[in-house]
Image: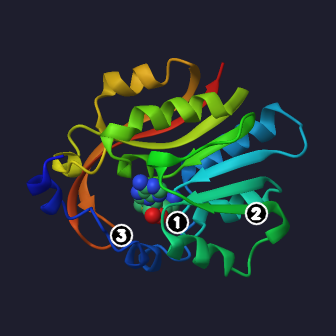
Amino acid sequence: MNTQLTLNDPLVNRNWADYYDAVRGHPPRNTLITALNLFDAQENFGNKLAVDLGCGDGRDTIELIRRNWNVLAIDGERTAITRLKNRSDLDHTLLQTQIIRFEVLKLPLETDLINASFSLPFCPSSAFFTLWEKIVKSLRSGGRFSGQFFGDRDSWAIYPSMTHLSCQQVEILLKPFEVELFQEQEQDGLTPLKENRHWHIFQIVARKR
Ligand SMILES: C[S@@+](CC[C@H](N)C(=O)[O-])C[C@H]1O[C@@H](n2cnc3c(N)ncnc32)[C@H](O)[C@@H]1O
């Protein structure tokens, strides 16, 4: 490990509670909504299981439960799960939670949906491809992935604690899938914490073959 680089990486030991405060009350992500609408349009099945990876304090989990999905909400931050469990606007009988880091995660088999909104880029690249294999293995055939990857022109691509991918790498990851939404977006902007940054994002919804 390059200790010098790690010490200079401001995203290591980030205070996620500030982020949760900044996005409090924001609506569910469009990638999640797209995936859920595709399920609603194409399939009529009961007892659906979603994993919300890097759920934060529940922006997407809440929507899944509102639509009657069983949800395993996972985050590495205890604060995220505590905040999620303290929310009054959800049916707790549909919710399971786990506090665990992506680097050591185990996922259930035969999941219908794995949603990872703005979370996978925060997995270190040394663990990312193993994590992605686990995601693909966990999904049943016909199950979906929804979420984002960060691209290699993103301003945080200099930080070693994260994973940034080229367009070609994203296409390779998606080979086991039929891609239903693939949007590459690039623009200058602000983070929810008002930090200036150049965003390079891939917005993805994909159905496992
Ligand atoms: C940008 S937030 C996204 C939260 C939520 N999904 C949303 O869309 O607002 C990223 C989340 O991923 C979690 N996270 C980051 N790195 C992680 C890791 N290595 N293992 C587990 N969770 C991680 C953070 O704790 C945080 O809640």
Q: Residue 93: x, y in percent?
A: 85, 66
Q: Nearer the viewer, residue 205 or 158?
A: 158
Which residue is disc 2 drawn over?
95
Q: Residue 137: x, y in percent?
A: 62, 28
Q: Is mark 1 within 8 Å of ligand 1?
A: yes
Residue 18 visible in image: yes
Q: Residue 183: x, y in percent?
A: 43, 36
N-terminal label among 1 and 3: 1
Distance from Cα at disc 3 to Cα at disc 2: 27 Å
Amino acid type at mark 2: Leu
Distance from Cα at disc 1 to Cα at disc 3: 14 Å
Task: Report the residue at 70% width, 41% height from top.
Answer: 108
Is 161 drawn above or below residue 207 in the view shown? below
Amino acid type at mark 1: Gly
Residue 182 visible in image: no
Which residue is disc 3 drawn over?
192
> Callout 1: few (<14), some (14-19), or many (20+) C-alpha neighbours within 10 Å?
many
Q: Nearer the viewer, mark 3 or mark 2?
A: 2
Which residue is disc 1 drawn over?
56
